[in-house]
Amino acid sequence: MGITKTDLFTVSQNEMASIAKVFAHPARIAIMEHLIKSNACINSDLVSELGLAQATISQHLKELKNIGVLQGTVEGTAMNYCINPEKWIEIKNMFNQFFDKNIACNGEDCC
Amino acid sequence: MGITKTDLFTVSQNEMASIAKVFAHPARIAIMEHLIKSNACINSDLVSELGLAQATISQHLKELKNIGVLQGTVEGTAMNYCINPEKWIEIKNMFNQFFDKNIACNGEDCC
DNA sequence: TTATTACATTGCAATATTACGATAAATATA
DNA sequence: TATATTTATCGTAATATTGCAATGTAATAA
């Protein structure tokens, strides 16, 4: 089907999954890493940096903007994209909360 | 196209993306959370717990096994799945390294 | 006004993912 | 042995994602 049955899961499970989905493409990881290195960046830089077409990069940027991890300001004809620090921390905390659960097995017949 | 141009990106960017992809479905988040709560679990438990078909759950478990975050031991006709603690820490560290980068803007014209 | 530049959007083709019924495989039980 | 139980795999339909050329839009420069 390709359709996810979101109604079967909790809000936080769906949220975690949809944020992870944005991180689930190497181009979007590369965009974030490049933005962090440069401290600011425009779309056209990324085209030469990553080797993907302008339309493709614009699409990835849109998905990163959609979850709020990127913010963009207009700079003449160019765009000035950078990481949204508040959202960055928020997502970081979300992953931390998930991974900080106690995963110790308690029974001797466990795994 | 639906095909990712992995050759354009670094090994670590591709790895991060492919692990995030496994976390990018609420059923797989729910499976991990249920395993952590129960400390051990079999496939048939999850079918009644999650409301997805047995074949679907088996498929999700396979993907979680593929990246090593789950391990399964045979228990008669049943399976005993649980979190792999070493891999759990490894993935946790991967995300921590990614999010612990300094994202402070340095220029006054930045965002 | 007419380019030019930079980015977004649209419309597709190719491929991937999700879900599940059917069925296979493996073990346990009568 | 025959049957039930549990999980894995296969095949397939529905939907989603990826990538890009073409085009649209908005601001600047000539």
Image (cartoon, coloured by chain):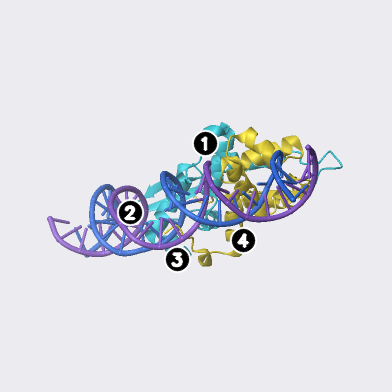
Chain colours: A yellow, B cyan, C blue, D purple
Q: Which mark is residue B6?
A: 1
Q: Amino acid under label 4?
A: Ser
> Which residue reaches farthest bottom?
A7
Q: Which mark is residue A34?
A: none
Asked whether the residues under the numbered discs 2 and 3 touch, taking CB atoms below 8 Å apart as contact, a structural biologist would say no
Badge 4 is on which residue?
A12
Residue drawn at the location 85% of the way across and 39% of the way down: B107
- Find the distance from the CA under tag 1 to the CA under tag 3: 35 Å
Between D12 and B15, the one nearer to me in the picture:
D12
**Residue B94 visible (yes or no):** no
Q: Earlier in the sequence, mark 2 or mark 3?
A: 3
Residue drawn at the location 63% of the way across and 46% of the way down: A58
- Find the distance from the CA under tag 4 to the CA under tag 3: 17 Å
Using residue A56 as the reference point, say whether residue B63 is left or right of it: left
Badge 2 is on which residue?
B77
- Find the distance from the CA under tag 1 to the CA under tag 2: 40 Å
Q: Secondary structure at mark 2?
A: loop
- Find the distance from the CA under tag 2 to the CA under tag 3: 21 Å
Q: Which mark is residue B51?
A: 3
Q: Nearer the viewer, mark 4 or mark 2?
A: 4
Q: Amino acid under label 1?
A: Thr
Whole-percent x, y for residue B29 in the image: 54, 55
Whole-percent x, y for residue A60 in the image: 61, 47
Q: Chain of mark 2?
A: B
Same chain under badges 2 and 3? The reply is yes
**Residue A39 visible (yes or no):** yes
Same chain under badges 4 and 1? The reply is no
Q: Mark 3: give few (<14), some (14-19) or many (20+) Cα within 10 Å.
A: few
**Residue B51: quarter of image:** bottom left
Q: Earlier in the sequence, mark 1 or mark 3?
A: 1
